[in-house]
Amino acid sequence: MFNGLADWWDGVELWLAQAWFPVQFVLVMVVVVPLCLAAAWVLDKLVGLFARRLTPGRDDDRTDGSA
């Protein structure tokens, strides 16, 4: 199974490496850029979630005892 997948990927990689530069550029813009944007959005949400859990709440910051 993995040999077939590896052979297919080798063919795709060879085709892409030999493709005309404008074709490569369009493929990067259509495929890679949206994937990077999605990964950045997911990482932003995860970091925000962990930051909210690790930072103290507003009420926990008060040292003077006022409400």
Image (cartoon, rainbow, N blue to C red):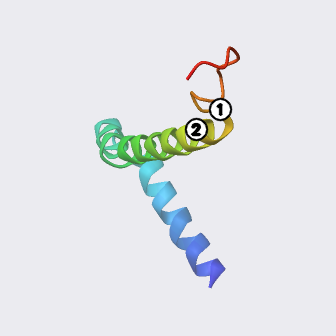
Residue lying at the far bottom in this picture: please name it: 1
Q: Residue at x 43, y 51 (%)?
A: 16
- List x then y, in percent, for residue 38: 41, 47
| Mark 1: amino acid | Thr
How packed mark 1 is, by other alpha carbons closer than 10 Å (few <14, some 14-19, many 20 or more), is few
Q: Is residue 32 above or below residue 56?
A: below
Q: Which residue is mark 2?
A: 52
Q: Secondary structure at mark 2?
A: helix
How packed mark 2 is, by other alpha carbons closer than 10 Å (few <14, some 14-19, many 20 or more), is few
Label 2 with label 1: CB-CB less than 8 Å: yes
Q: Residue at x 57, y 75 (%)?
A: 5
Residues under labels 2 and 1: Cα distance? 6 Å
Q: Residue at x 29, y 41 (%)?
A: 26
Q: Secondary structure at mark 1?
A: loop
Left or right, 6 with respect to 35, comes to: right
Q: Residue at x 55, y 44 (%)?
A: 49
**31 and 35: which is toward the camera:** 35
- List x then y, in percent, for residue 42: 48, 47
Residue lying at the far top in this picture: please name it: 64
Question: Which quarter of the figure has residue 20?
Answer: top left
Left or right, 25 with respect to 8, comes to: left
**25 and 44: which is toward the camera:** 44
Q: Quadrant of the C terminus?
A: top right
Left or right, 23 with respect to 46, comes to: left
Q: Is residue 11 above or below residue 52?
A: below
| Mark 2: amino acid | Arg
Left or right, 13 with respect to 61, comes to: left
- List x then y, in percent, for residue 51: 61, 36
- List x then y, in percent, for residue 43: 53, 42
Q: Which residue is mark 1?
A: 55
